[in-house]
Image (cartoon, grey):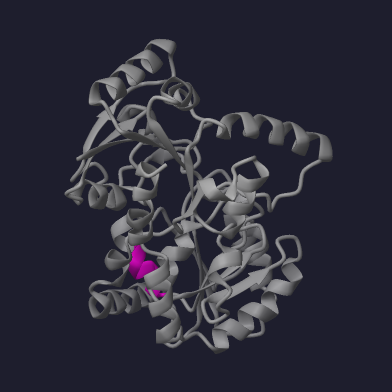
Amino acid sequence: MKRLAILSTHPIQYNAPLFRLMAEQESWEVHVFFSRTQKQVSYDPDFQREVAWDTPLTEGYAHSFVDATASSGVKELKQAIETFKPHALLVYGWNFPGHRQVMRTFYGRVLIGFRGDSHLLNPMPFWRRRLRQTLLRRVYRLVDLAFSVGTANTAYFQWSGVPASKIALAPHAVDNAYWQQDVAKRQQEAEQWKAALGIPVTASVIGFAGKLEPIKQVDRLIAAFEQISSPEAHLVIAGTGPDEATLHRQAAHHSRIHFVGFVNQSRMPIFYRMLSVFALPSFSETWGLSVNEAIASGTRCLVSDRVGCGPDLFRDPNLGSIVPWDRPSEWAPILDTMMNHPALKSESLEAFLKTYSYQAMLDALPKLWSE
Protein backbone atom coordinates (compact mmCIF):
# COMPACT_ATOMS: atom_id res chain seq x y z
CA MET A 1 0.00 0.00 0.00
CA LYS A 2 1.29 3.45 -0.97
CA ARG A 3 1.43 6.09 1.76
CA LEU A 4 0.53 9.56 0.53
CA ALA A 5 1.25 12.59 2.69
CA ILE A 6 -0.64 15.75 1.75
CA LEU A 7 0.52 19.19 2.84
CA SER A 8 -2.10 21.95 2.89
CA THR A 9 -2.55 25.14 4.89
CA HIS A 10 -5.91 24.40 6.51
CA PRO A 11 -9.23 22.61 5.91
CA ILE A 12 -10.85 24.04 2.76
CA GLN A 13 -14.41 23.31 1.68
CA TYR A 14 -13.31 22.49 -1.88
CA ASN A 15 -10.62 20.00 -0.82
CA ALA A 16 -12.27 18.11 2.05
CA PRO A 17 -14.51 15.88 -0.15
CA LEU A 18 -11.51 15.05 -2.36
CA PHE A 19 -9.38 14.11 0.64
CA ARG A 20 -12.17 11.82 1.83
CA LEU A 21 -12.28 10.12 -1.58
CA MET A 22 -8.50 9.71 -1.53
CA ALA A 23 -8.71 8.12 1.92
CA GLU A 24 -11.29 5.63 0.64
CA GLN A 25 -8.91 4.21 -1.98
CA GLU A 26 -7.82 0.74 -0.93
CA SER A 27 -4.35 1.04 -2.50
CA TRP A 28 -3.39 4.28 -0.69
CA GLU A 29 -3.01 5.35 2.90
CA VAL A 30 -3.54 9.10 3.18
CA HIS A 31 -2.62 11.57 5.90
CA VAL A 32 -3.20 15.30 5.52
CA PHE A 33 -0.83 17.66 7.35
CA PHE A 34 -2.18 21.18 7.86
CA SER A 35 0.50 23.84 8.34
CA ARG A 36 -1.79 26.13 10.34
CA THR A 37 -3.87 25.42 13.41
CA GLN A 38 -7.65 25.64 13.42
CA LYS A 39 -7.47 28.70 15.67
CA GLN A 40 -5.18 30.52 13.23
CA VAL A 41 -7.65 30.22 10.36
CA SER A 42 -10.98 30.52 12.15
CA TYR A 43 -11.10 34.31 11.73
CA ASP A 44 -11.14 35.55 8.15
CA PRO A 45 -10.08 39.22 7.99
CA ASP A 46 -11.62 39.68 4.54
CA PHE A 47 -15.01 38.26 5.54
CA GLN A 48 -14.47 40.22 8.81
CA ARG A 49 -15.89 37.42 10.91
CA GLU A 50 -15.26 34.00 12.41
CA VAL A 51 -15.92 31.54 9.60
CA ALA A 52 -17.33 28.18 10.66
CA TRP A 53 -18.43 26.17 7.63
CA ASP A 54 -21.58 24.17 8.26
CA THR A 55 -20.37 21.20 6.20
CA PRO A 56 -17.71 18.86 7.67
CA LEU A 57 -14.17 19.71 6.59
CA THR A 58 -12.03 17.30 8.63
CA GLU A 59 -14.14 14.15 8.72
CA GLY A 60 -13.31 10.97 6.81
CA TYR A 61 -9.52 11.26 6.49
CA ALA A 62 -6.52 11.19 8.84
CA HIS A 63 -5.07 14.61 9.54
CA SER A 64 -2.82 16.64 11.82
CA PHE A 65 -2.52 20.35 12.60
CA VAL A 66 0.92 21.92 13.07
CA ASP A 67 1.73 25.62 13.44
CA ALA A 68 4.43 26.14 10.80
CA THR A 69 4.57 29.91 11.16
CA ALA A 70 7.54 29.51 13.55
CA SER A 71 10.79 27.63 12.96
CA SER A 72 9.99 25.18 15.76
CA GLY A 73 6.68 24.43 14.04
CA VAL A 74 8.41 23.79 10.70
CA LYS A 75 10.68 21.29 12.45
CA GLU A 76 7.66 19.63 14.04
CA LEU A 77 5.91 19.48 10.66
CA LYS A 78 8.89 17.82 8.99
CA GLN A 79 9.16 15.31 11.81
CA ALA A 80 5.46 14.46 11.63
CA ILE A 81 5.72 13.77 7.90
CA GLU A 82 8.93 11.78 8.44
CA THR A 83 7.20 9.60 11.04
CA PHE A 84 4.41 8.83 8.55
CA LYS A 85 7.07 7.45 6.14
CA PRO A 86 5.34 8.52 2.92
CA HIS A 87 6.11 7.15 -0.53
CA ALA A 88 4.92 10.43 -1.98
CA LEU A 89 4.15 13.96 -0.80
CA LEU A 90 1.46 16.10 -2.43
CA VAL A 91 1.98 19.80 -1.68
CA TYR A 92 -0.82 22.35 -2.08
CA GLY A 93 0.94 25.66 -2.74
CA TRP A 94 4.59 26.49 -2.03
CA ASN A 95 4.41 30.10 -0.84
CA PHE A 96 3.11 29.37 2.65
CA PRO A 97 5.04 29.09 5.94
CA GLY A 98 6.84 25.75 6.03
CA HIS A 99 5.82 24.46 2.62
CA ARG A 100 8.97 25.25 0.65
CA GLN A 101 11.16 24.05 3.52
CA VAL A 102 9.29 20.73 3.53
CA MET A 103 9.73 20.40 -0.23
CA ARG A 104 13.48 20.98 0.11
CA THR A 105 13.78 18.48 2.95
CA PHE A 106 12.03 15.62 1.17
CA TYR A 107 13.11 16.24 -2.43
CA GLY A 108 15.10 13.29 -3.70
CA ARG A 109 13.93 11.10 -0.83
CA VAL A 110 10.19 11.11 -1.48
CA LEU A 111 8.31 11.71 -4.72
CA ILE A 112 6.89 15.23 -4.63
CA GLY A 113 3.67 16.16 -6.36
CA PHE A 114 2.45 19.72 -6.53
CA ARG A 115 -1.02 21.24 -6.76
CA GLY A 116 -1.53 24.91 -7.46
CA ASP A 117 -3.65 27.01 -9.81
CA SER A 118 -1.53 30.05 -10.68
CA HIS A 119 -1.60 31.48 -14.21
CA LEU A 120 -0.09 34.26 -16.35
CA LEU A 121 -3.32 36.06 -17.25
CA ASN A 122 -2.39 39.14 -15.23
CA PRO A 123 0.22 41.31 -16.99
CA MET A 124 3.24 42.60 -15.08
CA PRO A 125 6.33 44.68 -15.88
CA PHE A 126 9.07 42.85 -17.79
CA TRP A 127 11.60 43.10 -14.94
CA ARG A 128 9.17 41.71 -12.41
CA ARG A 129 8.14 38.92 -14.76
CA ARG A 130 11.78 37.87 -15.22
CA LEU A 131 12.45 37.92 -11.47
CA ARG A 132 9.32 35.87 -10.85
CA GLN A 133 10.32 33.34 -13.49
CA THR A 134 13.79 32.95 -12.00
CA LEU A 135 12.36 32.30 -8.54
CA LEU A 136 9.73 29.88 -9.78
CA ARG A 137 12.22 27.82 -11.75
CA ARG A 138 14.10 27.26 -8.51
CA VAL A 139 10.90 26.25 -6.72
CA TYR A 140 9.63 23.82 -9.33
CA ARG A 141 12.95 22.01 -9.62
CA LEU A 142 11.79 20.39 -6.38
CA VAL A 143 8.67 18.92 -8.03
CA ASP A 144 8.50 15.46 -9.61
CA LEU A 145 4.98 15.91 -11.00
CA ALA A 146 2.77 19.00 -11.19
CA PHE A 147 -0.98 18.44 -11.30
CA SER A 148 -2.41 21.14 -13.56
CA VAL A 149 -5.94 22.43 -13.02
CA GLY A 150 -6.37 23.67 -16.60
CA THR A 151 -5.00 25.41 -19.69
CA ALA A 152 -3.79 28.63 -18.05
CA ASN A 153 -2.18 26.71 -15.19
CA THR A 154 -0.34 24.39 -17.61
CA ALA A 155 1.09 27.41 -19.45
CA TYR A 156 2.26 28.79 -16.10
CA PHE A 157 4.00 25.55 -15.11
CA GLN A 158 5.80 25.32 -18.46
CA TRP A 159 6.86 28.97 -18.23
CA SER A 160 8.19 28.17 -14.75
CA GLY A 161 10.44 25.46 -16.14
CA VAL A 162 8.33 22.34 -15.60
CA PRO A 163 8.65 20.11 -18.70
CA ALA A 164 5.46 18.80 -20.29
CA SER A 165 6.46 15.26 -19.27
CA LYS A 166 6.19 16.32 -15.62
CA ILE A 167 2.70 17.86 -15.88
CA ALA A 168 -0.46 15.80 -15.38
CA LEU A 169 -3.85 17.34 -16.16
CA ALA A 170 -6.34 17.06 -13.30
CA PRO A 171 -8.98 19.78 -13.81
CA HIS A 172 -10.21 21.77 -10.83
CA ALA A 173 -13.45 20.38 -9.47
CA VAL A 174 -15.96 20.57 -6.65
CA ASP A 175 -18.13 17.86 -5.10
CA ASN A 176 -20.55 17.65 -8.03
CA ALA A 177 -22.77 15.12 -6.26
CA TYR A 178 -23.38 17.60 -3.45
CA TRP A 179 -24.46 20.36 -5.82
CA GLN A 180 -26.65 17.99 -7.84
CA GLN A 181 -28.65 16.45 -5.00
CA ASP A 182 -32.13 17.39 -3.74
CA VAL A 183 -32.86 19.40 -6.89
CA ALA A 184 -36.64 19.76 -6.41
CA LYS A 185 -36.33 20.69 -2.73
CA ARG A 186 -33.60 23.22 -3.36
CA GLN A 187 -35.48 24.77 -6.26
CA GLN A 188 -38.53 25.22 -4.05
CA GLU A 189 -36.38 26.83 -1.34
CA ALA A 190 -34.80 29.11 -3.97
CA GLU A 191 -38.25 30.33 -5.00
CA GLN A 192 -39.10 30.94 -1.34
CA TRP A 193 -35.87 32.90 -0.90
CA LYS A 194 -36.67 35.03 -3.95
CA ALA A 195 -40.13 35.74 -2.57
CA ALA A 196 -38.65 36.74 0.79
CA LEU A 197 -36.42 39.24 -1.03
CA GLY A 198 -39.40 40.62 -2.94
CA ILE A 199 -38.26 39.16 -6.25
CA PRO A 200 -41.03 37.79 -8.51
CA VAL A 201 -40.61 34.08 -9.25
CA THR A 202 -40.46 34.81 -13.00
CA ALA A 203 -37.85 37.60 -12.71
CA SER A 204 -34.32 37.09 -14.01
CA VAL A 205 -31.63 37.27 -11.33
CA ILE A 206 -27.91 37.96 -11.61
CA GLY A 207 -25.87 36.87 -8.62
CA PHE A 208 -22.44 37.24 -7.07
CA ALA A 209 -21.01 35.34 -4.09
CA GLY A 210 -17.65 35.89 -2.45
CA LYS A 211 -15.60 38.32 -0.42
CA LEU A 212 -16.60 41.92 -0.99
CA GLU A 213 -13.14 43.22 -1.79
CA PRO A 214 -11.73 45.37 -4.62
CA ILE A 215 -10.30 42.43 -6.58
CA LYS A 216 -13.81 41.03 -7.15
CA GLN A 217 -15.02 44.23 -8.91
CA VAL A 218 -18.53 44.04 -7.47
CA ASP A 219 -18.77 47.81 -7.88
CA ARG A 220 -18.36 47.38 -11.63
CA LEU A 221 -20.94 44.58 -11.62
CA ILE A 222 -23.42 46.94 -9.96
CA ALA A 223 -22.62 49.59 -12.59
CA ALA A 224 -23.14 47.05 -15.38
CA PHE A 225 -26.41 45.90 -13.82
CA GLU A 226 -27.68 49.47 -13.93
CA GLN A 227 -27.09 49.46 -17.70
CA ILE A 228 -29.01 46.29 -18.57
CA SER A 229 -32.17 46.69 -20.61
CA SER A 230 -34.45 44.42 -18.59
CA PRO A 231 -36.56 46.52 -16.17
CA GLU A 232 -37.48 43.46 -14.10
CA ALA A 233 -34.05 41.88 -13.49
CA HIS A 234 -32.58 41.76 -9.98
CA LEU A 235 -29.03 41.53 -8.62
CA VAL A 236 -28.33 39.49 -5.47
CA ILE A 237 -24.96 39.88 -3.74
CA ALA A 238 -23.82 37.32 -1.16
CA GLY A 239 -20.80 37.88 1.05
CA THR A 240 -19.13 40.30 3.40
CA GLY A 241 -15.81 42.09 3.35
CA PRO A 242 -13.97 45.43 3.37
CA ASP A 243 -15.99 46.89 0.46
CA GLU A 244 -19.37 46.08 2.01
CA ALA A 245 -20.26 49.57 3.26
CA THR A 246 -19.11 51.23 0.03
CA LEU A 247 -21.15 48.84 -2.09
CA HIS A 248 -24.23 49.39 0.05
CA ARG A 249 -23.91 53.13 -0.52
CA GLN A 250 -23.43 52.62 -4.26
CA ALA A 251 -26.61 50.53 -4.50
CA ALA A 252 -28.70 52.42 -1.92
CA HIS A 253 -30.95 54.02 -4.53
CA HIS A 254 -31.67 50.75 -6.32
CA SER A 255 -34.59 48.63 -5.11
CA ARG A 256 -33.62 45.66 -7.29
CA ILE A 257 -30.18 45.14 -5.76
CA HIS A 258 -30.19 42.88 -2.70
CA PHE A 259 -27.40 42.13 -0.19
CA VAL A 260 -27.87 38.84 1.67
CA GLY A 261 -24.66 38.77 3.71
CA PHE A 262 -22.51 35.74 4.37
CA VAL A 263 -24.09 32.54 3.01
CA ASN A 264 -22.79 29.28 4.42
CA GLN A 265 -22.08 26.18 2.37
CA SER A 266 -25.36 24.38 3.01
CA ARG A 267 -27.31 27.35 1.59
CA MET A 268 -25.18 27.94 -1.49
CA PRO A 269 -26.91 25.29 -3.68
CA ILE A 270 -30.15 27.19 -3.01
CA PHE A 271 -28.50 30.53 -3.76
CA TYR A 272 -27.27 29.37 -7.17
CA ARG A 273 -30.72 28.07 -8.04
CA MET A 274 -32.18 31.56 -7.56
CA LEU A 275 -30.02 32.82 -10.40
CA SER A 276 -30.30 33.14 -14.15
CA VAL A 277 -26.60 34.13 -14.32
CA PHE A 278 -23.79 33.86 -11.78
CA ALA A 279 -21.14 36.57 -12.26
CA LEU A 280 -17.49 36.53 -11.23
CA PRO A 281 -15.94 39.64 -12.82
CA SER A 282 -12.69 39.67 -10.79
CA PHE A 283 -9.59 41.40 -12.13
CA SER A 284 -7.58 38.49 -10.75
CA GLU A 285 -8.78 34.97 -9.92
CA THR A 286 -6.60 31.88 -10.07
CA TRP A 287 -9.52 29.63 -11.08
CA GLY A 288 -12.89 30.51 -9.56
CA LEU A 289 -14.31 27.34 -8.01
CA SER A 290 -17.58 29.15 -7.31
CA VAL A 291 -18.09 28.94 -11.07
CA ASN A 292 -17.85 25.13 -10.86
CA GLU A 293 -20.42 25.20 -8.08
CA ALA A 294 -22.80 27.38 -10.05
CA ILE A 295 -22.58 25.27 -13.21
CA ALA A 296 -23.00 22.04 -11.22
CA SER A 297 -26.17 23.65 -9.83
CA GLY A 298 -27.41 24.29 -13.36
CA THR A 299 -26.60 28.01 -13.59
CA ARG A 300 -24.75 29.71 -16.44
CA CYS A 301 -21.88 32.05 -15.62
CA LEU A 302 -20.22 35.27 -16.70
CA VAL A 303 -16.54 35.72 -15.83
CA SER A 304 -13.83 38.22 -16.68
CA ASP A 305 -10.85 37.34 -18.85
CA ARG A 306 -8.66 37.36 -15.73
CA VAL A 307 -10.50 34.37 -14.20
CA GLY A 308 -8.43 31.22 -14.66
CA CYS A 309 -11.27 28.83 -15.46
CA GLY A 310 -12.41 30.84 -18.50
CA PRO A 311 -10.22 29.29 -21.22
CA ASP A 312 -11.38 25.80 -20.21
CA LEU A 313 -14.99 26.00 -19.07
CA PHE A 314 -16.23 28.40 -21.72
CA ARG A 315 -15.00 26.54 -24.73
CA ASP A 316 -18.65 25.50 -24.50
CA PRO A 317 -20.49 28.85 -24.81
CA ASN A 318 -23.63 27.29 -23.37
CA LEU A 319 -21.92 27.22 -19.96
CA GLY A 320 -21.33 30.96 -19.98
CA SER A 321 -19.41 33.92 -21.32
CA ILE A 322 -16.09 35.73 -20.86
CA VAL A 323 -15.95 39.54 -20.75
CA PRO A 324 -13.01 41.97 -20.66
CA TRP A 325 -12.12 42.63 -17.03
CA ASP A 326 -11.63 46.37 -17.59
CA ARG A 327 -14.56 47.20 -19.89
CA PRO A 328 -17.72 46.90 -17.77
CA SER A 329 -19.69 48.82 -20.44
CA GLU A 330 -19.52 45.60 -22.47
CA TRP A 331 -20.94 43.43 -19.70
CA ALA A 332 -24.55 44.70 -19.77
CA PRO A 333 -25.49 43.55 -23.31
CA ILE A 334 -23.94 40.14 -22.66
CA LEU A 335 -25.86 39.81 -19.39
CA ASP A 336 -29.06 40.77 -21.25
CA THR A 337 -28.45 38.05 -23.82
CA MET A 338 -27.69 35.45 -21.17
CA MET A 339 -30.83 36.30 -19.19
CA ASN A 340 -32.92 35.89 -22.33
CA HIS A 341 -31.53 32.36 -22.74
CA PRO A 342 -30.97 31.17 -19.17
CA ALA A 343 -31.40 27.42 -19.61
CA LEU A 344 -28.24 25.32 -19.42
CA LYS A 345 -28.43 22.49 -21.97
CA SER A 346 -28.43 19.05 -20.39
CA GLU A 347 -25.71 17.72 -22.71
CA SER A 348 -23.40 20.60 -21.77
CA LEU A 349 -24.02 20.00 -18.08
CA GLU A 350 -23.37 16.27 -18.42
CA ALA A 351 -20.08 16.89 -20.25
CA PHE A 352 -19.03 19.39 -17.58
CA LEU A 353 -19.82 17.01 -14.71
CA LYS A 354 -17.82 14.24 -16.35
CA THR A 355 -14.74 16.35 -17.10
CA TYR A 356 -14.58 18.56 -14.02
CA SER A 357 -14.87 15.96 -11.29
CA TYR A 358 -12.72 14.68 -8.44
CA GLN A 359 -12.24 11.48 -10.39
CA ALA A 360 -9.78 13.32 -12.63
CA MET A 361 -7.44 13.85 -9.66
CA LEU A 362 -7.91 10.27 -8.47
CA ASP A 363 -6.97 9.05 -11.95
CA ALA A 364 -3.94 11.35 -12.19
CA LEU A 365 -2.39 10.66 -8.77
CA PRO A 366 -0.96 7.19 -9.60
CA LYS A 367 1.21 8.87 -12.24
CA LEU A 368 3.21 10.20 -9.30
CA TRP A 369 4.13 6.67 -8.21
CA SER A 370 5.46 5.92 -11.68
CA GLU A 371 7.81 8.90 -11.76
Q: Position of residue 135 (x, y in %)?
A: 66, 29
Q: Is residue 201 visible?
A: no
Query: At 76% from the left edge and 48% from the top edge, which residue is drawn?
Result: 123
Q: Quadrant of residue 227?
A: bottom right
Q: Position of residue 139 (x, y in %)?
A: 58, 30
Q: Decide which of 271, 222 is in the foreground and name it.
A: 271
Query: Does 112 sit left or right of 162 as displayed?
Result: left
Query: At 75% from the left edge and 71% from the top edge, which residue is drawn?
Result: 329
Magenta segment: 268-274
Quadrant housing the C terminus: top left
With respect to residue 49, does 36 lie above or below? above
Q: Position of residue 75 (x, y in %)?
A: 37, 13
**What number of labels is visible?**
0
- Which residue is outermost to the top? 72
Query: At 75% from the left edge and 60% from the top edge, which residue is drawn?
Result: 326
With respect to residue 30, does 273 lie above or below? below
